[in-house]
Image (cartoon, coloured by chain):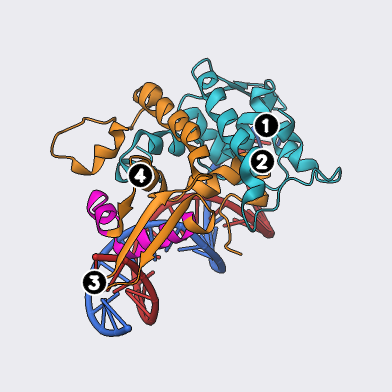
Chain colours: A cyan, B orange, C red, D blue
Amino acid sequence: MRPRRFDAKSGCAVGVTLSVIGGMWKPLILFHLFAGKKRFMELSRAIPNATQRILTLQLRELEADGVIVRRAYPQIPPKVEYEISAFGQSLGPVLLSLRGWGKQYGGSIEGVSQPHHAPEDRQLNACAL
Amino acid sequence: MRPRRFDAKSGCAVGVTLSVIGGMWKPLILFHLFAGKKRFMELSRAIPNATQRILTLQLRELEADGVIVRRAYPQIPPKVEYEISAFGQSLGPVLLSLRGWGKQYGGSIEGVSQPHHAPEDRQLNACAL
DNA sequence: CGGTATCCTCGCCGATACTG
DNA sequence: CAGTATCGGCGAGGATACCG
């Protein structure tokens, strides 16, 4: 059983949710997958700041939590697709809630660089969801 | 400017929200404060697993983000009260969303000890919100 | 009562290299 | 293409002690 950063100690059900979506890149991964099924390389290119290693790890955790489905086709060259599971769909409103607050109120906080939406920041494109 | 765990790198507005409520004890603190103004000692007793040090740090961060208000009365003995700011009220729906998902779907995840609501677990009382 | 100050641990995450 | 393997840093969070 994987240790969870926000597990029992934080006590609340909030911790359960955060342990599922709270990884560094998980929200971004989920947003991309909510837009549709993706291959590993597509995700990697969509989130260039995440190394392959960490991307793999976070995908494995999301899979273990049942929110995404990993489908590996035994071919050469290999092909693996990830997509949101039926269960994972239930996270949609939660993520939208988090994202909505950040967009609406994040600007009111000191020291937070709000999305300039600079066209060159390709890694932010997922925010379009 | 305090470094934010989920800052620019995660790219999305989700990261902004998580940087505000993502601390280990912040959800719990906020739930307690949503129930009404509290003194430091009340919070400390309500969240016995958090040391005074970490409690102070997280309260300071929440204050810096403007979601709570700290009011110190210059007396002997000292008296400090914390309460949700008007701005902080806007986090209510987000927290409820997170908590709702955890309560509803958290049980479907392997390795997550869902709230037994054992009566002796006094630290979980905030979940009643 | 409501904090600081100090030191320490632990695991998330990054960089780089290698493989079926 | 889609990963593992290995090494290492860094920072959040904890233990403990002391202070105005």
Mark 3 vs 1: CB contact within 8 A: no
Of badges 2 and 3, nearer the viewer stands 3
- Pinpoint the chain carrying mark 3: B
What crowding class fits label 4: few (fewer than 14 Cα within 10 Å), some (14-19), or many (20 or more)?
Answer: many
- Mark earlier in primary sequence (2, 3): 2
C-alpha span from label 2 to label 1? 20 Å
Residue at image mark 2: B12
Q: From the image, which quarter does the C terminus of chain A lie in? A: top right
* SS for dot 1: helix
Identified by mark 1, the residue type is: Phe
Q: Residue furthest right?
A: A119
Q: Is residue B4 left or right of residue B110?
A: right
For label 4, the residue is B28
What's the CA distance linking mark 2 and mark 3? 45 Å
**What is the secondary structure assignment of the residue under circle 3?**
loop
Judge by depth and name the residue closer to the eye, C3 or A65. Answer: C3
Which circle's residue, 4 or 3, is located before the other in the chain?
4
One can see residue A29 in this view: yes
**Residue occupied by mark 3:** B77
